[in-house]
Image: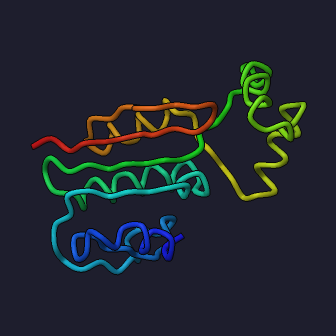
Amino acid sequence: MLDLARERLSRFGSRVLLVAGDLSEPNAIALPSFSFRAAFSVQTIHHLSDAEKAAAFAWLAALIEPGGLIVIIDRVKVEEQLFRDWAAIWRKLDPRTPETYAEHVGELTEAGDRPALLQDQLAWLELAGLHASCLHLYGNRALIVGRKSD
């Protein structure tokens, strides 16, 4: 993913810093000591436990400068009570969509995925001191942003 990002973001030159690290232990990630205007996470947060998600959001919020932006594109949890509704729509995009909630959870577990509810992620971003919103939601894929006050 970093190679793909490097290729896609090469036109921005030194304004982009790509870092490999383990967000389950964000304080162990080595970063240069300068301020950041934005942070992006694409399809990574759903691998963390809920406590790790909240801690990663707090870490990111502390890293960005006032007015800075955090952009997260990731999976969100589908509640069991809404699974049939989600699956009926999602199946039009992916005929391999599981038939039951148990099968869906089994596939997530097998892949190491632990998506959280959208409202929980928004709450964790706000607890980290950010103004948070979901700018786009498509099935169980969300574009979530958090902006730090000026």
x%, y% of residue 97? 83, 37
Outermost residue, left side:
150
Instruction: Name the residue rendered at 44%, 57% in the picture.
Output: 41
x%, y% of residue 28? 41, 77
**Frontmost residue, 3 versus 142:** 3
Query: How many dots with numbers?
Result: 0
* Residue 54 left/right relative to 141: left
Outermost residue, front side:
11
Relative vertical location of residue 27 with respect to residue 55 in this rendering, above or below: below
Relative vertical location of residue 40 with respect to residue 26 in this rendering, above or below: above
Instruction: Name the residue rendered at 25%, 75% in the picture.
Output: 13
x%, y% of residue 145? 35, 41
Quadrant assignment for the C terminus: top left
Quadrant assignment for the N terminus: bottom right
Relative vertical location of residue 9 with respect to residue 85 in this rendering, above or below: below
* Residue 63 left/right relative to 102: left
Q: How is the image coloured?
A: rainbow
**Frontmost residue, 58 versus 18:** 18
x%, y% of residue 76? 59, 39
Relative vertical location of residue 62 with respect to residue 135 in this rendering, above or below: below
* Residue 126 left/right relative to 92: left
Instruction: Name the residue rendered at 49%, 56% in the picture.
Output: 42
* Residue 114 left/right relative to 15: right
Instruction: Name the residue rendered at 76%, 25% in the picture.
Output: 83
